[in-house]
Image: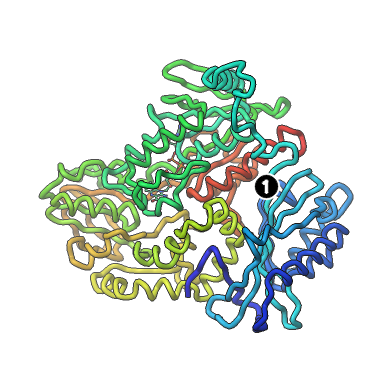
C-alpha cells in the first residue's frame, strides 16, 4: 500500500461503506459543504459537529484561534467549537461563511481509495471561505466518507487561514516603485533597508533556510524584518558541513519559498550548490541581513512597551535594537557530546560529526564512528571512499532505516509529477492531521515500506545491524515518518549507500554494547570487549534545541517556555514551532523545508495580527 500525500487515505477505525459505482464527487462535495456552511453561519455547533464521522479529525491553523489545533472525535471537536469567545460559541464568533468549492476545472473534488481497502472510496476536495472575526480568508480541505447509515461525513477537515482582509500577501505591489518613477529600484531597496535597520519590527536570529524564508515571507506581508547571522556568508552553515554532503531529500521537496530551483539542478543538491543558492536567494529576495553578527545573551523583554532590548554585535560594534518580535531560527541544536570516561587518555583523533571535514587525511587509518544515523552514514561513506583501513560503527540500539530507493518509490516520486505546485502539495500535506498519520502508520501502513526494503534489511541484520520501526519496544511501528515528526529525525537512517557498505563488510558493526570508557587505544565496552582506533567520530546527534535557546535567552525566559521544542504535543502539533512559544514576542522557527515554506505564512499572519491589534 502506498501513502500518496496527494490523494489520501483513510481511517482504520471506522467501518466504511462501499461507495456506489456511480460516485459523483462534485455533487456529494457540494451537498456536504452547503450543509456545513449552514451549520457554520448559524453557529449551530451540534449540527456542525454532526458533519464529522464519530471518529473524525479536525485540524485548524489560525481560523478559530491564534494557534494550531488538532482534535479527534466528535466529542472533542464539539467541546472546542462550543467554547465561549467574547460571549458566543467559538463557531459563532469566527463565523465561517461564503464557502466555495475550488474551481472544478483546476481542482475538482475527487474520489480516493482507503489504503488497504481498495473497494472503499471516499471523496476529497478543497474549498475557500471567509471568516468574520478576525476578518480573513481561509481555505479548507475535506475528506468525506459514508457512515453506517450512508450519510457523507468528514473523517478529516482542515481549515487554514490564508490572508487577513486588506493585507493579502498577493496584493503587495509586484512592480515596485516603477509606476511613478520617483526613485530607482536600488534607491527604493536602500530606503527599505535603512528603515528596517533603524527600527526592525521583527529580529530574526539565524540566516539558514528557516530564518531566510521567515524574512522573505514577512517582507511580502509588509513587515520590517532584520536577520542576524553569525557567519560571514549566507549558506556557510551548509558550506561548513562535511564535504560529501548532498541533500537526502529531492530538490522539489527541498524548494525554497517563492523560488524554485533552476531546472538543470540535480535531483539531490550537493551542499555547496545549496549554500550558493541560499546566498543568491537572500540577494534576490532583497532580505535585510547583518552578517558576521550575533545577539548577546539575555535580551530583555519589556511587557509595558511590548518590545525587546537586544544587543547585537555587528562586526565588532555593539548595536542596541528594540524589535517587537524576536524569531529564533538558530537551527537544530549544538553537537551532543555524551559523557566520555577517560576520553583524554585516547591518543588518536576524536571529534563530533559536525566537525568532520577531511577524510583524506585519515587514509589508511582505523576509524570508529559512534552512532548509526544519517551523519554516521555519510561520514562512513566518506572514509571508505578515501581509503580508511577499517571503518566500524558503534550502534548502541536499533536504527529506523529506509533506503533512498524505497523512499523514492513510496513517497518522493509520487510528488514529482510537477502537476501539483509545491504550495498546493504543502497545503494538502498540512491538511492531514499529524496524529492521524501516525495512527495510520501504527495500524500497518508501513508494511509497504518494509516490503520494499526487505532484501536489504535481511542482509543488514545478517551483518549485525539492528533495525526498528518503533521508538521503544511495544510503542507501535511508526517508521521514518514517525521518527521525523516525533523525534526530529533522531535515530533514523535515510540510506544513500551506507547499507550496501555494511552488507559488503566494508563498514563493520559493533552492536548493542554500551561504552564503558575510552583508553589510549580506543573504546572499551561494558561487556569487556574493545575497539582500537586511530580516529573516533562521535555521530551522536545534537542537543535539544531548548539548550541553545536557553543559552541565548537566559534562564528567566527559558523557564517560562514549555521544556521541549519540536516533537509533538498531546494533539499532534509541533511543540512551540511557528506558533505561540509561551512568551510574548518570542517565536521559534525551526523545521524541515516543507514546514518553513508553509508555516512561515502562519508566523507572518500571527505577527501581522498582533501588529494590527487584532490578536
Ligand atoms: C548534515 C545535515 C544534513 C541534512 N540534510 C538534510 C536533507 O537532506 N534534507 C532535509 O530536509 N533536511 C536536512 N537536514 C536538516 C535541516 O534541513 C538542516 O539542518 C537545515 O540547515 C535547518 O535549517 P535551519 O535554518 O533551521 O538551521 P541552520 O541551517 O542550522 O541555520 C541556522 C543559522 O543560524 C545561525 N546562528 C545560530 N546561532 C546564532 C546566533 N546566536 N547569532 C546569529 N546567528 C546564529 C547559524 O550560523 C546558521 O546559519 C540536514 C541537517 C544536517 C545537520
Asked if 557 appears above or below 82 in the picture, the reply is above
Asked if 231 appears above or below 69 in the picture, the reply is above
Q: Position of residue 46 (x, y in %)?
A: 84, 66
Report crowding for label 1: few under 14, some 14 to 19, many 20 or more residues within 10 A (C-alpha): many
Ligand 1, image quadrant it occupies: top left
Where, by quadrant of the figure, is residue 26 drawn? Answer: bottom right
Q: Residue furthest left?
A: 364
Nearest to the observer: residue 611 or residue 122 = 122
Asked if 372 appears above or below 306 in the picture, the reply is below
Label 1 sits on residue: 162
Colouring convention used in this rendered image of the protein: rainbow
Q: Position of residue 602 (x, y in %)?
A: 63, 45
Point 52% across, 72% down: residue: 442
- Label 1's element? strand
**Disc count in the image?**
1
Nearest to the observer: residue 20 or residue 427 = 20
Q: State the quadrant of the C terminus.
A: top right
Q: Decide if residue 320 is in sight here.
A: no
508 relative position to 550: left or right: left
Point 23% across, 42% down: residue: 344
Nearest to the observer: residue 61 or residue 525 = 61
309 relative position to 405: left or right: right
Nearest to the observer: residue 59 or residue 581 = 59
Amino acid at each position: 500500500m502506498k501513502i500518496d500525500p496527494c490523494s489520501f487515505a483513510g481511517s482504520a477505525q471506522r467501518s466504511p461503506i462501499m461507495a456506489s459505482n456511480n460516485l459523483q464527487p462534485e455533487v456529494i462535495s457540494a451537498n456536504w459543504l452547503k450543509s456545513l456552511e449552514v451549520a457554520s453561519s448559524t453557529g449551530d455547533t451540534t449540527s456542525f459537529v454532526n458533519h464529522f464521522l464519530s471518529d473524525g479529525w479536525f485540524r485548524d491553523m489560525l481560523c478559530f484561534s491564534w494557534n494550531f489545533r488538532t482534535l479527534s472525535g466528535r466529542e472533542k471537536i464539539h467541546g472546542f467549537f462550543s467554547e465561549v469567545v467574547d460571549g458566543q460559541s467559538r463557531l459563532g464568533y469566527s463565523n465561517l461563511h461564503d464557502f466555495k468549492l475550488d474551481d472544478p476545472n483546476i481542482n475538482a473534488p475527487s474520489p480516493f481509495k482507503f489504503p488497504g481497502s481498495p473497494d472503499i472510496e471516499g471523496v476529497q476536495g478543497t474549498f475557500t471561505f471567509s471568516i468574520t472575526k478576525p476578518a480573513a480568508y481561509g481555505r479548507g480541505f475535506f475528506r468525506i466518507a459514508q457512515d453506517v447509515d450512508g450519510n457523507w461525513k468528514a473523517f478529516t477537515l482542515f481549515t487554514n487561514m490564508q490572508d487577513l482582509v486588506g493585507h493579502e500577501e498577493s496584493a503587495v505591489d509586484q512592480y515596485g516603485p516603477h509606476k511613478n518613477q520617483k526613485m530607482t529600484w536600488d534607491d527604493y531597496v536602500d530606503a527599505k533597508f535603512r528603515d528596517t535597520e533603524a527600527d526592525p519590527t521583527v529580529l530574526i536570529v539565524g540566516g539558514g533556510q528557516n530564518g531566510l524564508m521567515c524574512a522573505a515571507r514577512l517582507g511580502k506581508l509588509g513587515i520590517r524584518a532584520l536577520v542576524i547571522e553569525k557567519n560571514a556568508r549566507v549558506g556557510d552553515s551548509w558550506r561548513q558541513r562535511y564535504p560529501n554532503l548532498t541533500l537526502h531529500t529531492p530538490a522539489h521537496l527541498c524548494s525554497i519559498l517563492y523560488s524554485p530551483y533552476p531546472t538543470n539542478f540535480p535531483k539531490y543538491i550537493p551542499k555547496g550548490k545549496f549554500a550558493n543558492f541560499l546566498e543568491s536567494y537572500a540577494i534576490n529576495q532583497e532580505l535585510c541581513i547583518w552578517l558576521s553578527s550575533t545577539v548577546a545573551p539575555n535580551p530583555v523583554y519589556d511587557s509595558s512597551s511590548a518590545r525587546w532590548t537586544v544587543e547585537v554585535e555587528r562586526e565588532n560594534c555593539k548595536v542596541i535594537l528594540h524589535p517587537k518580535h524576536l524569531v529564533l531560527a538558530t537551527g537544530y541544536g549544538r553537537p551532543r557530546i555524551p559523557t566520555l570516561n577517560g576520553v583524554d587518555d585516547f591518543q588518536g583523533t576524536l571529534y563530533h560529526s559536525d566537525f568532520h571535514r577531511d577524510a583524506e587525511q585519515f587514509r589508511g587509518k582505523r576509524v570508529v564512528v559512534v552512532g548509526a544515523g544519517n551523519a554516521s552514514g555519510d561520514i562512513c561513506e566518506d572514509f571508505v571512499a578515501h581509503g580508511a583501513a577499517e571503518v566500524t560503527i558503534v550502534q548502541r540500539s536499533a536504527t529506523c532505516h529506509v533506503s533512498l530507493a524505497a523512499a523514492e518509490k513510496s513517497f518522493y516520486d509520487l510528488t514529482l509529477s510537477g502537476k501539483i505546485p509545491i504550495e498546493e502539495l504543502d497545503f494538502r500535506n498540512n491538511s492531514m492531521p499529524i496524529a492521524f498519520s501516525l495512527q495510520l502508520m501504527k495500524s500497518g501502513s508501513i508494511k509497504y515500506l518494509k516490503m520494499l526494503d526487505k532484501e536489504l534489511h535481511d542482509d543488514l541484520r545478517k551483518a549485525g545491524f539492528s533495525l526498528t520501526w518503533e521508538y521503544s519496544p511495544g510503542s507501535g511501528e511508526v517508521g521514518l515518518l514517525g521518527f521525523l515528526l516525533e523525534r526530529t529525525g533522531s535515530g533514523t537512517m535515510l540510506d544513500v549507500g551506507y547499507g550496501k557498505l555494511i552488507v559488503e563488510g566494508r563498514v563493520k558493526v559493533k552492536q548493542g554494547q554500551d561504552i564503558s570508557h575510552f583508553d589510549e587505544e580506543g573504546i572499551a565496552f561494558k561487556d569487556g570487549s574493545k575497539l582500537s582506533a586511530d580516529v573516533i567520530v562521535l555521530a551522536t546527534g545534537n542537543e535539544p534545541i531548548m539548550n541553545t535557546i536557553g543559552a541565548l535567552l537566559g534562564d528567566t525566559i527559558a523557564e517560562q517556555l514549555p521544556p521541549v521544542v519540536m516533537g509533538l504535543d498531546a494533539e499532534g502539533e509541533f511543540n512551540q514551532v511557528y506558533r505561540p512559544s509561551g512568551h510574548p514576542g518570542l517565536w521559534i522557527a525551526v523545521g524541515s523545508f516543507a514546514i518553513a515554506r508553509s508555516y512561515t505564512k502562519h508566523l507572518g499572519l500571527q505577527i501581522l495580527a498582533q501588529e494590527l491589534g487584532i490578536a
